[in-house]
């Protein structure tokens, strides 16, 4: 068997149902092997491993990421050397930052040409080593199959992440015996994974935890992306419902707890719901689960959850404990097991707390500080469009986004009944994520409604992928909320740069998004610019069988509220004109050392 | 505080640069770094001296433990340990001073490797502080032409050993 055939066979053995990638010189042997594999399977009437080809390798990386985020399975991206590989650096870093398991297989120049500045050569191990969970350069072809299996293992275990396998062309062409099993020795990593799986909440730990919970009257769960990644949503739900503890989620944690539940307080943080942030300010015991106190959440760590007498933290990654905020109790290990252990310990101890006062306070916060906007405006308000979408999807659709205002509006106004429906570039904040991620998610879930809620600037970044949608007749729905520019940048320039819209206004640009969609084969491509048409067009979009595209001309001045400015605390949150604030707040320009 | 951290690392492409990259990416400081093979050909031992608050050192150790190639990590400073550093010095010794310099070197436990007055090479293996004092003293007695320090090596003082466990 050739090295290339071994690569394909390992992918098949790992249960890969789709490959995202773009061919080129150094990966030709493997593309040929995929072709032959699929031809053979087709003849035998067996399931193939289809290749989905993007416009740009960055698209392939985000398709693999969308596939992985929507399913929890490892996404696979297959690209050539040099520019093919470097175009995937952004999705690899994005997956690292959001803990998403993908395997990127890059062709590399032949072993003998490495280091000679050969055509389409790039130092992939050095570049990717800085951004990936791990990188392998296969120089010994006898280790190729074991390396690939190990790459999948590393991508999906522990805190998941991207693994890059750099395969020189001669290694793909090498002929050898396929063993069908075996992995590389990674003794340190495996030992640590083993130790993690053995880390259970002990009776002593649980006792300490419930001591803290017993002395609290306003406990709050703060759930992050780790809950989604660990498949711990159900366990989190059991924990919250058993003891009646309300839940705020991070941007990445959205969907880890059903947003329509009475105990759900939605998203906290820089653009979190006012009631969620006030709940954090009011809580006396904060339980962080798979969350990392990052700067979008705890902009001022010392003043985050300032009234919390105790903080507990559960995570799979020891490095996250006490990284930003000192905690009083921590557990490092698998989240579902830890949460369930705490539930059963509490039940065995007949712990039946009464948080009805706290619940009543939160219900009042939710009423008084509800999300709201200018409903009387004659312009189309983006929030209204998202509410209309949400009326149809009812928290059951997969929603992907780009990065910026539209991303925050979607996070604030969409419901999510389950995890893995909300696909967004959280930590890296990569514009252009939405469309390719939606494509990957749709391929993984052919029967789910998948909507890319995007912005005019974000979608431009990977607009070539519109064609990918129609090439494969994917029923992805694309909604572009067009405010003629980089809305979030404009919002900051208005707040902190005296309204000087340096390079963020695109109202003079000539782009016709509808024509672009039509040119790429969208049979449903509509511009929505009258408020009264919103319900009809949203319905048409969602009911359309096949790819559908809507450009919505929204109020260009619509802002994202609430907003906790950089270096500000939750009490200094700006809520805008339509959401009630419980503090008098003045807008402060951030200092030079503050985050953005 | 100064910490000596010993790391057993698999000899894979780019493994060392990932360790070094961790320090530069996260803004941690490396005071010295030494790398050499162990009895197991696939594993090297890195000894790294760094400075930082307890919280920073904890983060360093946690992040080192996340690197796939890292077999094991030990913060030597946490327990009783031995610490040695090797230094080679090349000096230009003034006429008639050779014996005095040689005398100091030998009394301090060092060795003269090459007695040529224009390239007088000496060696000392001692603690980091002793090495620093040795260098300072010789720089006073002669003209210092070149210095090569290995960086500190450390080993814990109990039966417990940092070994490759398969």
Image (spheres, coloured by chain):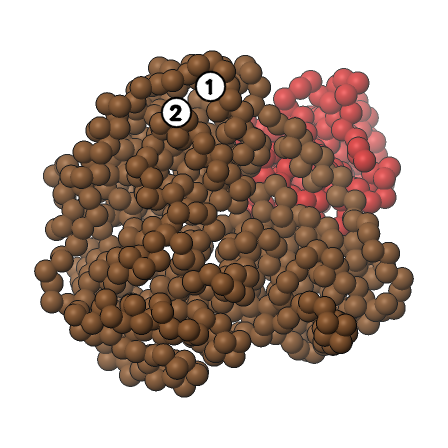
Chain colours: A brown, B red
Mark closest to the chain's N terminus, 1 or 2:
2
Give SS at disc 2.
helix
Q: Which numbered dot is residue B79?
A: none
The image shows residue A259 at horizontal and vertical percentages of 34, 44
CA–CA distance in space, label 1 to label 2: 8 Å
The image shows residue A176 at horizontal and vertical percentages of 89, 64
The image shows residue B96 at horizontal and vertical percentages of 79, 35
- Reply above or below: A321 against A517: above
Taking the image as shown, residue B64 lies to the left or right of residue A45, namely: left
Chain bearing tag 2 is A
Taking the image as shown, residue A547 lies to the left or right of residue A572, namely: right
Chain bearing tag 1 is A
- In the picture of the structure, the residue carrying the numbered disc 1 is A346
Q: Residue at x 63, y 72 (%)?
A: A51
- Reply above or below: A115 against A258: below
Q: Image quadrant of residue B22?
A: top right
Q: Image quadrant of residue A173?
A: bottom right
Give SS at disc 1.
helix
Q: Residue at x 52, y 45 (%)?
A: A229
- Reply above or below: A116 against A557: below
Tell if the residue under mark 1 belongs to the same chain as the one under mark 2: yes
Q: Is residue A484 visible?
A: no
- In the picture of the structure, the residue carrying the numbered disc 2 is A243
Q: Is residue A551 visible?
A: yes
User: Quick one: B129 or B4, which is closer to the camera?
Assistant: B4
User: Quick one: A135 or A373, which is closer to the camera?
Assistant: A373
Near mark 2 (Cα within 10 A), the count class, few <14, some 14-19 or many ≥20, is some
Give the residue furthest to the right: A177
Evaluate if marks 1 and 2 touch, with contact meaning CB atoms under 8 Å apart.
yes
User: Quick one: A188 or B81, which is closer to the camera?
Assistant: A188
- Reply above or below: A160 against A454: above
Taking the image as shown, residue A283 lies to the left or right of residue A557, namely: right
């Amino acid at each position: 068997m050739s090295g290339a055939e071994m690569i394909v066979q390992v992918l098949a053995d790992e249960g890969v149902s789709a490959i995202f990638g773009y061919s080129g010189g150094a990966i030709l042997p493997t593309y040929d092997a995929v072709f032959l594999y699929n031809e053979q399977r087709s003849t035998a009437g067996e399931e193939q491993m289809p290749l989905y080809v993007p416009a740009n390798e960055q698209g392939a990386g985000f398709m693999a990421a969308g596939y992985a985020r929507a399913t929890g399975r490892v996404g696979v991206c297959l690209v050539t050397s040099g520019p093919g590989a470097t175009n995937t650096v952004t999705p690899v870093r994005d997956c690292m930052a959001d803990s998403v398991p993908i395997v990127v297989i890059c062709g590399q120049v032949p072993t003998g040409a490495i280091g000679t500045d050969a055509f389409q050569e790039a130092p992939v191990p050095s570049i990717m080593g800085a951004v990936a969970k791990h990188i392998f350069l296969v120089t010994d072809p006898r280790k190729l199959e074991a390396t690939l299996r190990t790459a999948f293992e590393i991508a999906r275990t522990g805190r998941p992440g991207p693994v890059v396998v750099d395969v020189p062309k001669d290694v793909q062409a090498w002929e050898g015996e396929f063993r069908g099993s075996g992995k590389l020795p990674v003794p340190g990593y495996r030992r640590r994974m083993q130790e993690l799986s053995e880390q259970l909440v002990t009776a002593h730990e649980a006792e300490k935890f419930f001591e803290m919970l017993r002395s609290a009257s306003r406990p709050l769960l703060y759930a992050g992306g780790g809950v989604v990644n660990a498949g711990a949503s159900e366990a989190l739900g059991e924990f919250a419902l058993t003891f009646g503890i309300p839940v705020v989620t991070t941007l990445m944690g959205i969907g880890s707890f059903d947003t329509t539940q009475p105990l759900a307080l939605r998203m906290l943080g820089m653009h979190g719901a006012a009631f969620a942030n006030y709940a954090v300010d009011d809580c006396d015991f904060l339980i962080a689960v798979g969350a990392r106190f990052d700067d979008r959440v705890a902009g001022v760590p010392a003043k985050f959850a300032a009234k919390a007498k105790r903080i507990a933290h559960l995570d799979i990654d020891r490095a996250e404990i006490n990284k930003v905020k000192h905690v009083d109790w921590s557990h490092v290990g698998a989240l579902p097991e830890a949460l369930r252990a705490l539930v059963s310990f509490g039940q065995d101890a007949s712990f039946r707390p009464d948080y009805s006062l706290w619940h009543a306070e939160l219900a009042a916060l939710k009423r008084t500080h509800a999300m709201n906007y200018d409903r009387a405006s004659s312009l189309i308000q983006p929030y209204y469009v998202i509410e209309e979408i949400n009326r149809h999807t009812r928290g059951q659709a997969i929603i992907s986004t780009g990065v910026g205002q539209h991303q925050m509006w979607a996070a604030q106004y969409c419901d999510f009944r389950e995890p893995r429906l909300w696909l967004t570039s959280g930590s890296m904040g990569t514009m252009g994520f939405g469309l390719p991620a939606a494509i990957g998610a749709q391929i993984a879930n052919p029967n789910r409604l998948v909507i890319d809620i995007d912005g005019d600037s974000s979608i431009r970044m990977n607009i070539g992928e519109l064609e990918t949608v129609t090439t494969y007749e994917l029923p992805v729905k694309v909604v572009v909320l067009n405010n003629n520019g980089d809305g979030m940048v404009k919002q900051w320039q208005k707040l902190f740069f005296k309204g000087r819209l340096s390079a963020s206004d695109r109202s003079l640009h000539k782009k016709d998004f509808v024509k672009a969609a039509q040119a790429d084969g969208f049979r449903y491509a509509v511009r929505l610019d009258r408020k009264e048409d919103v319900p009809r067009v949203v319905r048409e979009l969602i009911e359309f069988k096949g790819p559908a595209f809507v450009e919505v001309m929204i109020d260009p001045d619509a802002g994202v509220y609430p907003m906790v400015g950089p270096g500000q605390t939750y009490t200094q949150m700006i809520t805008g004109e339509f959401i009630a604030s419980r503090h008098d707040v003045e807008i402060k320009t951030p200092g030079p050392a503050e985050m953005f | 505080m100064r910490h000596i951290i010993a790391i057993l690392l698999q000899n894979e492409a780019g493994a060392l640069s990932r360790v070094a990259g961790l320090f530069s990416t996260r803004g941690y400081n490396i005071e010295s770094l030494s790398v050499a093979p162990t009895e197991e050909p696939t594993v090297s031992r890195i000894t790294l001296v760094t400075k930082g608050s307890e919280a920073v050192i904890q983060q360093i150790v946690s992040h080192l433990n996340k690197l796939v190639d890292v077999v094991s990590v030990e913060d030597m400073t946490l327990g009783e340990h031995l610490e040695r550093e090797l230094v080679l010095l090349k000096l230009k010794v003034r006429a008639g001073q050779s014996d005095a310099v040689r005398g100091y070197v030998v009394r301090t436990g060092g060795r003269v490797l090459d007695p040529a007055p224009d390239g007088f090479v000496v060696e000392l293996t001692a603690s980091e502080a002793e090495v620093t004092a040795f260098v300072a003293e010789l720089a006073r007695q002669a003209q210092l032409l070149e210095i090569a320090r290995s960086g500190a090596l450390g080993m814990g003082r109990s039966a417990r050993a940092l070994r490759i466990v398969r």
